[in-house]
Amino acid sequence: MALHTKILLGLVVGAALGITINLLTGGTAGTEQFVSSVTEPIGRVWLNALIMVVIPLIVSTLSVGIAGLGSLKRLGRIGVVAMLSFLSLTALSTMLGLAAVNLLKPGEGLEPSVTERLMETYQGDSDAMGLAEGAFGIDLFVRIVPRNPVQAAANGEMLAVIFFALMLGIGLTIVGRENAQPLLNFLESLGHVTIAIIGLVMKVAPLGVACLIFSVTARFGFEILFNLVKYIVTVVGSLTIFFVVGYSLILWFVARRNPVEFMKRARVVILTGFSTSSSNATLPTTMRVAREELGISDAVAGFVLPLGATMNMNGTALFEGVTVLFIAQVFGVDLSLGSQLIVILMSVVTAIGVAGVPGGSIPLLMMVLGIVGVPVEGIAIVLGVDRILDMCRTTLNVGGDLVTAAVVDRFENGRRGPTSTIPE
């Protein structure tokens, strides 16, 4: 049985058992004792195992990713246009997702008593990586730059850790390849080991998810599951809107290509990305289609597409933003405008560092939850349906790689390719 099937089964079994216990006992002291002594500790051990790898994952993936870019001067105009396109698309997709959550409010609608109990039960455990009340503004700007990065990591100051990782990557590009290579080798090895640990932890994800969702539903009943359906509709709807409307507008006005013809020629890439849930696994197909079907130059395709498979995660960033706000709504955590801006920034940055393995985005998503003070236990609500959402967001990711390649090709070579029917 595939891992994602086991996780979904764990969600279903845990939720069914929890709801049954809640209906039979009405959340009595005996139920609370069992949850707090058995299922919740098991679930939290699994969560802690994922949180454990966040620091090494961020330091290794972000620093190596930045170092892999080299200097923008060396990359030239292709690198500048590609990076601007990546960052712009990722930020726009995240903002669309947050707008959809604020409009539809899929996490709201619970009984006030349920929301209050959720906050009382879990809010106290969400402060480790969170920001203090009123920390936005100058104080936050100062705290981003750590005096001691090791102490910042120990204290869970994730913004400072991310800043250090970015500076480390920039430093590696400055000192030259020969001097940087020993540290690069270490960081690359650390990244591989961290991903291997994530793989081990995810093997017991069905048990962890079952225990966490059982703990929530045994305490609070089945109401939360209705919100889960609204959450799925919000994520898939936002991804679809950005794919159909956002990419079409960029292709038409920026790349000067016919969006319908473009997507028709790229359909094999879209289907491959949807079925594999992996930008890396789709990359060979993406490069072939870009060159043979879309008429993108070898130089642009050879640079933009491999880089995009690692860094251009529009769908992942949108998913992270929607998920953070959804879980915040479920737990009754009111995120201010400043907090939502942090969510946008963190979704863009962490999407770059997402490991290309099943469950690779989960530790970073939990980090974003912790940064804005949302209980990380809420991740159990969405993990069971993550597989279908992963397929959908990967479709947006690989589509964004092709759109960016078309934009760069337009600016670099002045070409519109065989999909263009738009006059100058």
Image (spheres, rainbow, N blue to C red):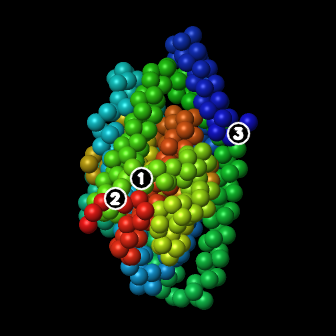
Q: Residue at x 52, y 66 (%)?
A: 291
- Sequence-wise, which precedes: disc 3 or disc 2? 3
Residue at mark 1 to residue at mark 3: CA–CA distance: 36 Å
The amino acid on which the numbered mark 3 sits, given as a three-letter code, is: Ala
Task: Determine whether label 1 and label 2 are within 8 Å by CB.
Answer: yes
Tag 2: Cα neighbours inside 10 Å, few (<14), some, or many (≥20)?
Answer: some
In the rendered image, residue 52, in percent from the top left (x then y), is placed at 60, 54
Tag 3: Cα neighbours inside 10 Å, few (<14), some, or many (≥20)?
Answer: few
Checking the image for residue 2, the label placed there is: 3
In the rendered image, residue 335, in percent from the top left (x then y), is placed at 31, 43
The amino acid on which the numbered mark 2 sits, given as a three-letter code, is: Thr
The residue that disc 2 covers is 421
377 or 70, nearer to the observer: 70
Q: Residue at x 37, y 24 (%)?
A: 110
Name above or below for residue 248 compared with residue 8.
below
In the rendered image, residue 62, in percent from the top left (x then y), is placed at 51, 67
Checking the image for residue 261, the label placed there is: 1
In the rendered image, residue 145, in percent from the top left (x then y), is placed at 38, 70
Asked if residue 107 shows in the view, the reply is no
Asked if residue 403 shows in the view, the reply is yes
